[in-house]
Image (cartoon, rainbow, N blue to C red):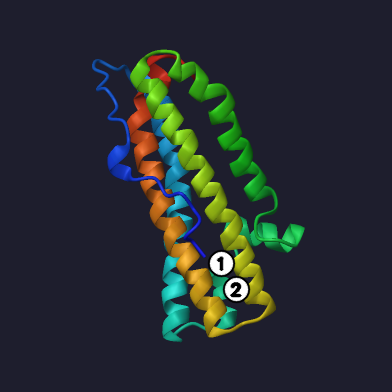
Amino acid sequence: MLDDIEFLDDATRPEPPRLEGLTEAQKAPGEHLKMVHDHLRENMQLLRELIARAAAGTVSPGQVVEETANLAMIANYRRFGNLCGRYCQVVNIHHSIEDQSIFPVLGSRSEVFRRITERLAAEHVVVHELLVRLVGALTELAREPSEANFAAARQLYETLERVLLSHLGYEEDAIGDALGYFQVV
């Protein structure tokens, strides 16, 4: 299920330079990026807890519906008939803006930021592939609830969570301050 995904080794990530003497205004874009990422982290944590409770048999389907009612993914499922809906479109647009607009500008500032932004773009490809596969696994689980389908969806979720949380932290550390320092956004 995951053998054909080319995972990237976190140890090979380019080390970001330390930018000294940043003003509050220069720090603001990085803080905004972290705020957006924190919302994703909160949603991932809620889903993780629900998966654990479902695996333990301590949550009913009704409780799952109630506790996930405000998640963007679930709201999109109700509105658009699939788990991604506009949420995945927004993620895709967000990554496209970074890949096509922010990363080239930031990458032009120095060799190290070029390497960092190339790495972040490569990580976007892995995250996207995991999202696509997770949606497929969840669709299959909804179509045919079984232990095997639950295990497959859980494995994909756990892999996505590990990769995504690592990616978000690296992105914040590597380019957060640089966004304002170089006036990219």
User: Which residue is at 59% across, 80% downward?
Assistant: 62
Percent across and percent down for residue 139 are 66, 69
Identified at 44% across, 85% down, the residue is 58
Toward the viewer: 177 or 121? Answer: 121
In the rendered image, residue 174, in percent from the top left (x then y), is placed at 34, 30
Q: Residue furthest front?
A: 4
| Percent x, y of residue 160 | 46, 56
Distance from disc 2 to disc 1, alpha carbons, whole Å, reads 5 Å
> Considering depth in this image, is 30 or 8 the residue closer to the camera?
8
**Residue type at tag 2:** Val
Left/right placement of residue 148 relative to residue 14 reads right
Whether residue 70 is visible = no
Q: Quadrant of residue 33?
A: top left
Location of residue 25 with respect to 168 vertically, above or below: above
Residue 68 circle label: 1
Residue sticking out furthest to the bottom? 57
In this view, the residue in front, 39 or 51, is 51
Helix, strand or loop under label 1: helix
Q: Dot 1 surroundings within 10 Å: few (below 14), some, or many (20 or more)? A: some
Q: Are marks 2 and 1 in contact (CB under 8 Å)?
A: yes
The residue under label 2 is: 65
* Residue 23 - label: none
Q: Report helix, strand or loop for mark 2.
A: helix
